Amino acid sequence: MIRIAPSILSADFAQLGTEIKKLEAAGADMIHIDVMDGHFVPNLTFGPPVVAALRQFTALTFDVHLMVNNPQDLIAPFARAGADLITVHAETAPHLNRLLQNIKETGSKAAVALNPATPLSMVEEVLTEVDMILVMSVNPGFGGQKFIPSVLDKLARLRHELDKRKLTVDLQVDGGINAATAPQVIAAGANILVAGSAVFGAPDMKAAIAMLRNAE
Ligand SMILES: O=C(CO)[C@H](O)[C@H](O)COP(=O)(O)O
Ligand SMILES: [Fe+2]
């Protein structure tokens, strides 16, 4: 089962509540919220108060992708704001095992993200601790970037490792997902596709989400 997580990074920021309602009506499986701090990545987006304000618009899973330094300081505030799934970047977390435990203690699901240049070995020892691994297919910071093809081999190696160890862990891919790249990442083993510009830039959001979900 392929799930689609539209990223509100490409939404109209002046109407985020309405945009989330539209995503739900268009068949989104979860809402991907890109949190950027202007330090780990050169862009600045949403904080916990914005997520809390958006919580009233949908019961869909809030998939919060933290692209921030010192993520440990933001786990509890985002969980209180209504995050259902919190993803931290391996590059920002020297005490990754502890951080994942901290996320799970809040009642949220826990995930780790890897930049395109970060090796899979960074998550090898925590695969039993996570609900999801996010493999970035662009360098984080901006929507609308071009998919980095070398990520396909990385996805396939990770899916193989998860299958070999019989681990039920979701494999999410984020960045440059569209009609051309969706079939490739699905073939490589991804089961949750994040898409910002491909959903918000499409004339028909519902058709775009269905197209990505059924891509093969
Ligand atoms: O984490 C992200 C960027 O850092 C975004 O989720 C991602 O880039 C989605 O945008 P698009 O589908 O337009 O590439
Ligand atoms: Fe993201």
Image (cartoon, rainbow, N blue to C red):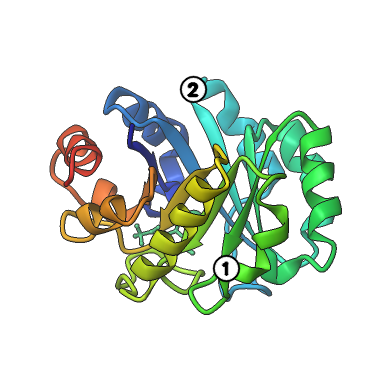
- Relative placement, left or right, of 176 versus 60 is left
Give me the residue at 65% from left, 51% from top. Answer: 127
Which dot marks residue 58? 2
Q: Which mark is residue 120?
A: 1
Q: Position of residue 162 (x, y in %)?
A: 52, 49
Mark 1 residue type: Leu
Count numbered badges in the picture: 2
Image coords of residue 157 (percent x, y): 44, 63
Q: Is residue 31 found left or right of 12 in the rendered image?
A: right
Residue 69, placed above or below residue 52 = below
Q: Quadrant of ligand 1?
A: bottom left
Task: Give the CA separation, mark 2 to mark 1.
Answer: 34 Å
Q: Secondary structure at mark 1?
A: helix
Between label 2 and label 1, give the one nearer the viewer: 1
Residue located at (24% from left, 53% from top):
182
Seen from the viewer's position, the closer of residues 157 and 37 is: 157
Identity of the residue drawn at 36% across and 76% down? 150
Q: Which mark is residue 81?
A: none
Residue 71 image position (x, y, % from top left): 77, 58
| Residue 22 vs residue 88, the one in the foreground | 88
Residue extending furthest toward the bottom? 117
Specify whether tag 2 is near ligand 1 (CB below 8 Å): no
Quadrant location of residue 3? top left
Residue 40: x, y in percent? 66, 73
**Left or right of 95, for residue 175:** left
32 lies left or right of 75: left
- Hey, what amino acid is under mark 2? Thr
